[in-house]
Amino acid sequence: MLFKVPRGTQDILPSETWKWQQVESIIKHVSDAFRYKEIRTPIFEQTELFQRLVGETTDVVQKEMYTFTDKGNRSMTLRPEGTAPVVRSFVENKMFGIPDQPVKLFYVGPMFRYERQQAGRYRQFVQFGAEAIGSADPAIDAEVIALAMNVYQRAGLTDLKLVLNSLGDTECRKAHKDALIAHFTPHIDEFCSDCKSRLDMNPLRILDCKVDSGNPLIATAPSLPNYLNEDSAAYFEQVKSYLDDLNISYVVDANLVRGLDYYNHTAFEIMSTSKGFGAITTLCGGGRYNGLAEDIGGPSAPGIGFAMSIERLLLAMNAEGKSFDEEPNLEVYIVTLGDDAKRPGFKLLNELRKSGIRSDMDYMDRKMKGQMKSADRLNAEIVVVIGEDEVAEDVAMVRNMSDGTQEKIATSELVGKITSSLKR
């Protein structure tokens, strides 16, 4: 029976993992510069965590979660996003008691959503996310956005657009919710079943509906900025002022609501404007989530964060024609001739590797010609040849592949001389 990779997933082969490692290196470097520390949470959590924090009315909870019952008859879910697990860990491990606040965290890892596969979108995908928990300062909003922008810029992307909106505080959200209910109720039969079920619980989700996006009632729906109270409007102005100070350009879009229920105040998306990127332009999304820690029994700990898809970052780099550094070449290839040479060659291989030298040898019992071809294919800088004569003399023949020069070197001096001759 021929097995295939599950639908919506992918094998990332060695020819591609080098690109992933470079992107992950950028992420870790930028996160370190911003002083965000890595956190690693479990792949699965209690289902109720996502139901409570992500929101019962979201597509993520209603349609996309991979949920299973474990042997203890508990409902568990493969994490569909990273914020809820991070906030759970923040509360459970009492990180609110750490003297230095806010607590700044980042994560990189697989997430799982059962959705239709599209370019750069998979059912198992990898997210980089950052969370700053414990501060209600609008400057931290700008810092989090700057972190995300910095990662894209370090990756070489230039075709970027930052879109902002304010969702306001609880008071604003309620006033806007009442206005939306009044607006949509007389014509709700024109909308899909999802929108009908969301009308009373979370009518804001109707504005984000993909099925009914062309309905004229969405275009004429009450605009959230018109319902911002004085404090919320002032907060949003401060966020924009800090972004101006950082020379980060942005566009304000009153229809930006994001797909998760926990957002309030600042919401944002970073999009690719590259012509070759495709129809779905969003690279990254995030926002403020004051009140999330309290929802699971923690103290007041306002937070803000974002998540970006590594797959879509790589897709954007390809669309803009950004190149990757070449993978480091093989430094030393050991050619052994005859059974008596195999063991000293194998021992030398281990000594080279312990010295941090990228080394390999033949394991297919090839003749010398075949081994030399293998060294060529691997772009080895140096080839070490050990045959019966070399074993008897306790030496090895060392050939520089760039200029063809070679010399006999005593076994005891091999590692030192090879190390000094390598182009590092």
Image (cartoon, rainbow, N blue to C red):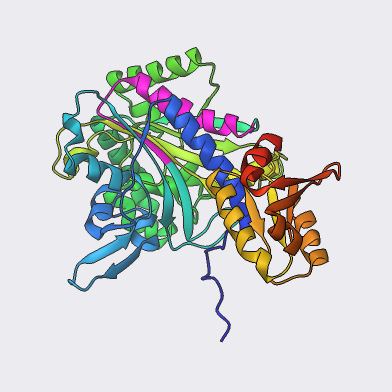
Which quadrant is home to the C terminus? top right
Q: Nearer the viewer, residue 370 or 36?
A: 370
- The residue range painted magenta reads 129-157
Q: Is residue 140 magenta?
A: yes
Quadrant containing the N terminus in the rendered view:
bottom right
Residue at 59%, 48% (x, y): give it.
Answer: 352
Instruction: Name the outermost residue toward the right.
Output: 404
292 lies above or below 158: below
Residue at image location 56% in from the left, 33% down from the top: 152
Front residue of 332 and 102: 332
On the question of residue 363 being in view, the answer is: no
Image: 227 above or below 408: above
**Does residue 351 appear left or right of residue 239 in this picture?**
right
Instruction: Give the percent coordinates (x, y) of residue 227.
Output: 33, 28
Evaluate whether residue 369 shows in this view: yes
Q: Quadrant of residue 338?
A: bottom right
Percent coordinates x, y for residue 130 in the rendering: 39, 36
Residue at the image position 49 percent from the left and 53 percent from the top: 210
- In the shown orientation, is residue 409 left or right of residue 349? right
**In the image, is residue 198 part of the stretch drawn in magenta?**
no
Residue 289 at x, y = what percent?
30, 36
- In the displayed image of the protein, which residue is found farthest to the top? 245
Foreground residue among 171 and 240 = 240
Q: Quadrant of residue 138?
A: top left
**Residue 47 position in % (x across, y down):** 25, 59
Of all residues shown, which one is farthest toward the bottom? 1
